[in-house]
Amino acid sequence: MDNFFTRYRNETVLFGILFLQVIALATQVRVSDAGGFTGDPNISGRSSSTRLIRVWAVAVISPFQKLSVNSGSGVRNLWGKYVGLIHVRDENARLQEQLNELRLQQTRLQQDADQGRRLQALLAFKEQYVEKTIAAQVIGTSGTDLSRVIYIDRGYRDGVEAGMAVITPDGIVGKISRADRSTSQVLLITDQLSGAGVLLERLRLNGILKGTQSGSPEVLNVMADEKIEVGDKVITTGGDRVYPKGLAVGTVINVAPDRERDPFLSIRVKPAVNLGHLEEVLVVTQLSERSNAVADATVPIRAADMLAQRLPSAKKKTEEDGKKTESPEQSGAKPLTNETTNTTSPKPVAKAVSQPSKPAEKTKESPR
Amino acid sequence: MAQRSITREGIEVHRFSIIAALVIPLFALFLQASLPLRFTFFSIFDLPLLVTIFFAVARRNPLAGTLTGFIIGLVQDSLTYQHQPIGLFGISKTIIGYLASSIGVKIDVENPGSRLLMTFGFYLLHRGIYQALRNMVRMPIEFNWGHELGAALANALLAVALFMVLDRYKQRN
């Protein structure tokens, strides 16, 4: 026996180590009812705790990464502040021109936005706003295409938690999958285990964004008879409770029938953010849900008046009812009681008019 | 630093100092985790795999090769997505470490040509094992032959240059 182990020592050690790892692997993996692994800890039933070996590995590597990134930034700053200022005057003039154009554009957009908010207020529409973000520097990656994650230099001591959205001004990046003390791991939207609720902006079609091995995520669950075109914009729906609504996700680059899911399309998307060259990102640490009745308080127009402008058929009756019910303290949406509207307009209008009274009372932000 | 001895078959066996044995794999892991941030194409390289092969071949000791692959693989696993099981790279690199050191005992792996071929083959084998493990844990991923062959060639070319640099840390008696 002794001879056997001496003779086959290498092979014994090899199989011993492999056996231990396979057992360890088996204890880590849980499969869903459908028989597949999902990266979502809630679905697969795994706990959200972190294995110590991951913490150690990151603790060893991340200080060097931070040092490397910071020293790199120092050199770039030196270049940017002193050497790279040669054409700054021309650039400044060009930017000033651009700013003027944008100001005009902003005025137009502001009017549209105000109108949209007023209409949303009529429907007691609640919208998610990014309330608080913290800036973070990207310090590292997993180093392999087989797991598309990045590491940032902010952790739980900065208020970062697992599940928070990570964005840039260009669009969404991913979500926090783990927060250590001073670093966090971010699962990119291009990873095969990531997912997000998205909307094809032009057609207002909902779908699910999933990462792929190639790095171009695809939108699933869109029927084959939809007229999706290359170049269509994809934005977030907010329905996944991770990414705030309306953020850019990317642009459609390819549409083809999904071979694995027959009546559906496989829609490839080019991410809006260049995920290969990320330097700084924003972690959304707080979202708030506001009703747009806030907008009503700033605009001196009653909901009923606006409705009357938009729906001439309801104007006359609303004015009559306004005379009956209006008092000095009843401004804004208050005069429009259920009783009033029910007697003056058909049902769908009555519904729309009666709702603003609720959000008007709830103008305070309610962080989730 | 490293020491060299001759086996009965007449093949050189090298050793490395503890510092080199620790710093080189750690540096490789650091570069692998950092360089793709600035140079996206770098993620097709697998420096930890190349270092595993280098140490295994140079030491020509299957036990040491197995342990080197095991440790480097586990650390690499630790840097992947939080909910991905640890051990996928660990098992792949353990097998590669063992095989590389076993091959190192039998054939000459000091010249650039054999290093190129050996790394090319080991890269594909490593990806094959990893792919099989991903299927085993029901996390299948796409396997694109064209991409993998290109990546194998790129890694093999890098290995030739890298091994020449790392050869300096093998001390001759």
Image (cartoon, rainbow, N blue to C red):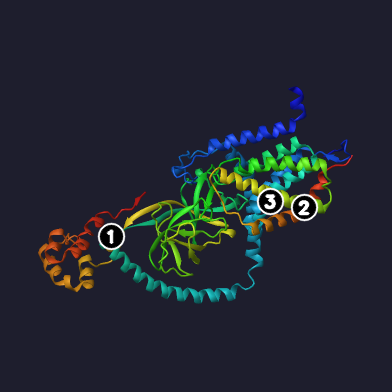
- Residue A67 seen in render: no
Nearest to viewer (mark 1 / mark 2)? 2
At 55% from the left and 37% from the top, the residue drawn is A26
| Depicted A105 relative to depicted A247: above or below | below
Q: How far apart are marks 2 and 3 (CA)?
A: 11 Å
Horizontally, residue B158 falls left or right of residue A263, namely right
Q: Residue extending furthest top?
A: A1
| SS at badge 3 | helix
Nearest to viewer (mark 1 / mark 3)? 3
| SS at badge 2 | helix
Q: Distance between the residues labelled 1 and 2?
A: 70 Å
At 54% from the left and 56% from the top, the residue drawn is A212
Quickly name the residue at label 2: B117
Q: Distance between the residues labelled 1 and 3?
A: 61 Å
Residue B115 locus on image (x, y percent): 79, 51
Amino acid on which the number 3 mark rests in the picture: Leu
Quickly name the residue at label 3: B124
Tell which subunit mark 3 falls on: B
Alpha-carbon neighbours of circle 2 within 10 Å: few (<14), some, or many (≥20)?
A: some
Q: In which quarter of the image is the N terminus of chain A?
A: top right
Quickly name the residue at label 1: A293
Amino acid on which the number 1 mark rests in the picture: Ala
